[in-house]
Amino acid sequence: MTTRVSVLAALAREMGPLADELEPLAAALVDGDEESAAQYLAVLERLSNVVEMLDLPALGDFTLHLLGNIPGQLGSSQDGDLVAGWPRRFEAFLHAPDDADAHAALVACMCDQRWPDPMQPEQAGQILEQLRAADAADGEPPRQPRTFTAADADLQWLPDLTTEMRGAFEHEAPRYAATLNHHLARLSTGDQTHEDLRQARRMAHTLKGTATLVGARAVVNLTHLLEDLLESLQESPASAGPALIDDLQSAGDSLEEMIEALLGQGPAPAPADIQALLENMDQWVVRLASEPA
């Protein structure tokens, strides 16, 4: 028997870490902290970019609704439950889209009249139904490996990138990549622990979000694949054979080279080499997903 992850289940995995980031920012935002409001919106922009890559118009409508409403909540301490509560309600819906209580709780949050521009119940219901319809049906065969294009291997900054966003990437990305590579290196020593896999996956997820903000698609794609692989290894550590470990370490080294190239500190890998790396990692993702549960 094989296992597969539905679209909504994959989104639910994304929402858990995002909710962890948003909760403390929400408390500061409703207290009037403008810097926290900017950080909160940046996290939503990351979600919006993920939505665009997944081609889910219904979720795009949902994130646009939030992006338009959050600034109006700055300093609205009496409405803190709205800003802090929607991520967990959304995550609960993604985990159980057929659960009537989860559905109703999210619709009620989206339509709450305390939002500057609340949704109408009919619109909210349509968005959630479209998400359910986009979810893959149970029993479909696992997906096949992807073919990555030159655009997927792109290492260019976004043309309208702000100085602040670029500076944040320059400050954070090398540290995240080095930490990720440290944990990947421990896989070959036999000393790795479940905590190493968890920390490596967390770094991959964080770096993916940081790279999404600046438009580095090659980094986004590679860290997304690494995150999926590390999740599979958390569930089945015995799958970490020598060949996979070698490929993970090569991917970690290539990731650091990509970031150095973005920062002007080294030559950029050839696009064809990045495409080959992405396709190899994707083949591992498909292979591990098709192993017996």
Image (cartoon, rainbow, N blue to C red):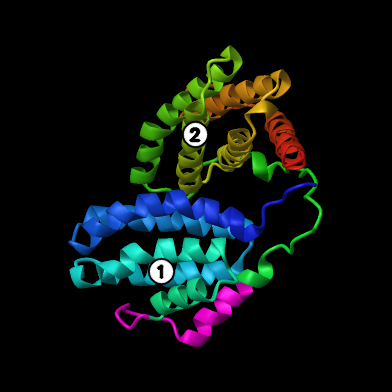
Q: Which residue is mark 2?
A: 198
- Rendering coords of residue 262 (x, y %): 50, 32
Label annotation for residue 201? none
Closest to the observer, 105 or 34? 105
* Within-10-Å neighbours for mark 1: few <14, some 14–19, many 20+: some
> Could you tell me which secondary element the residue under label 2 belongs to?
helix
- Rendering coords of residue 95 (x, y %): 55, 61
Residue range highlighted in magenta: 112-130
Mark toward the start of the polypeptide (2 vs 1): 1
Label annotation for residue 66? 1
Identify the amino acid type marked 1: Leu
- Residue 286 vertical position relative to residue 117 in the rendered view, above or below: above
- Rendering coords of residue 248 (x, y %): 63, 25
Identify the amino acid type marked 2: Arg
* Within-10-Å neighbours for mark 2: few <14, some 14–19, many 20+: some
Residue 71 seen from this side: no
Within the image, what quadrant is residue 132 found in? bottom right
Closest to the observer, 65 or 11? 11
Quarter occupied by the C terminus: top right
- Rendering coords of residue 133 (x, y %): 67, 72
